[in-house]
Amino acid sequence: MGRLLLNSQESIVSDKLVKCTRFRNDNRASLGDASNGTIWTGNFTKQHDANTSWILMEGMLPGASNYSDQCGVYAMLDGASTSNDTPRHRGIYYSGVNEDQPWARFILYVHRIIDNSDSTQELDAGNRTWTIGWKTRDGGSGNKPFKIWNPNSNEDNRMNQNGSIMSIYAYLY
Amino acid sequence: MARLLLNAPDQTPVGGIIKISKYRDETRQSIGSVQGASGRSQLVNNFTFTKLKDNTTSYILVTGILGGVGMDNYPHIGMCCTIDQIGYGYNTNASEASSHPAGPAGGGVFYCGVNTGSNNEGTLFIVHKSFKTFDLDAGTHRLDIGWNSNTNVRPTTYLNPNNSDNARHHQTGSHILVYEIAR
């Protein structure tokens, strides 16, 4: 009533963006062979609890040189279930050129919705850690999505240094 | 100051988010080779969402990814992403689709991967489309993503692959957000 009296504008109805934390990595790295591994990790602060805000992880990681056709890539916040077929393996995918050559390019894209419909345990307030990595479902060793993360002129002298970005968006329900 | 005293909410900023609808598909499915209208909803089929404001107040932006395995038809096949089935060229009859395969429904979704029928290889779809030029009033709407081709084709063999396709796969999933944004 007070808002109407003051002729202030209508409020945002829902899904208000409360915070976005951005990350960059511009360092070329060779990924190791394993049944599981971490590619990139970072920390952020989540202001609200699981029932108040949800998270969108969105980012893109460039790669070079084909290795495993698939290896169980995941995007997660700490607290996520690490069992087989759990939500951390959804909203993340990669594809590229099926050649073990430095010019064979890959995109690993993350667009994972994390909310309390299936991932409450990832959404506590406080200091949180996010991770991008892989874990094969069958435990098969000697895997990785591609050989080189953030390729540069070492792969092809026409290339500048590539970089990865990650944005962690926190929205109110 | 008065707003703070009255504990009234913040005002809506220009371009602010009004509502987000979440689409998550975590079921492996075989994708058929089809043409024309039959392909238009093969990847996302009739996802319904509610738009809160009228066309003059807000518009829709769609972003997300889908994952598949196998790509036995690798040419451009008229990928479509649209709301309320608007803009599928001049024709709605599949047999006439070749005269205008995509129309304004086309674009906003594209895919890449290995041009092979092998179901080991990943196909990544990226969705990013603004519907600011579409006339979408408040109410219930539908989102559809697929293709519109004049021959029987498919961009991938299985959507949302799992360990049925390869023992190293967990169940994968497609995640898309439908943003309603103030104009």
Image (cartoon, coloured by chain):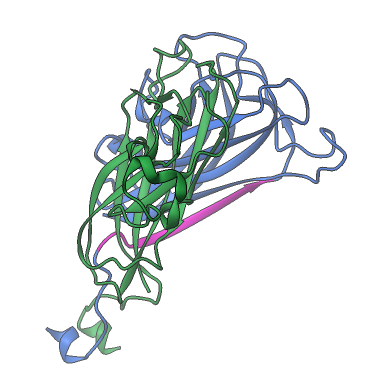
Chain colours: A blue, B green
Residue at (31% x, 26% y) in the render: B27
Figure quadrant of residue B66: top left
Q: Is residue B40 at least partly visible in the picture?
A: no
| Residue B69 in view here | yes
Left or right of A152: which side holds A131?
left
Q: Residue at x 35, y 51 (%)?
A: B91
Q: Is residue A15 magenta?
A: yes
Residue B170 image point, x, y percent: 41, 19
Residue B36 in the figure: left or right of residue B45: right
- Residue at the spot 27% in from the left edge and 34% down from the top edge: A118
Q: Is residue B60 left or right of residue A52?
A: right
Span highlighted in magenta in the image:
A14-25
Label tally: 0
Which residue reaches farthest left? A1
The question of residue B65 being in magenta is answered with: no
Residue A25 x/y as whole percent: 66, 44
Q: Position of residue A159 (x, y in %)?
A: 81, 43
Which residue is at a point 41% across and 14% down the rendered structure image? B163
Q: On the rendered structure, is B122 left or right of A100? A: left
Which quarter of the image is occupied by the C terminus of chain B? bottom left
Of residues A129 and A17, the one nearer the viewer is: A17
A82, above or below A154, in the image: above
Residue B30 is situated, as x and y percent measured from the top left of the image, at: 36, 22
Q: Quadrant of the N terminus of chain B?
A: bottom left
Please, what is the dominant secondary structure of the magenta stretch? strand
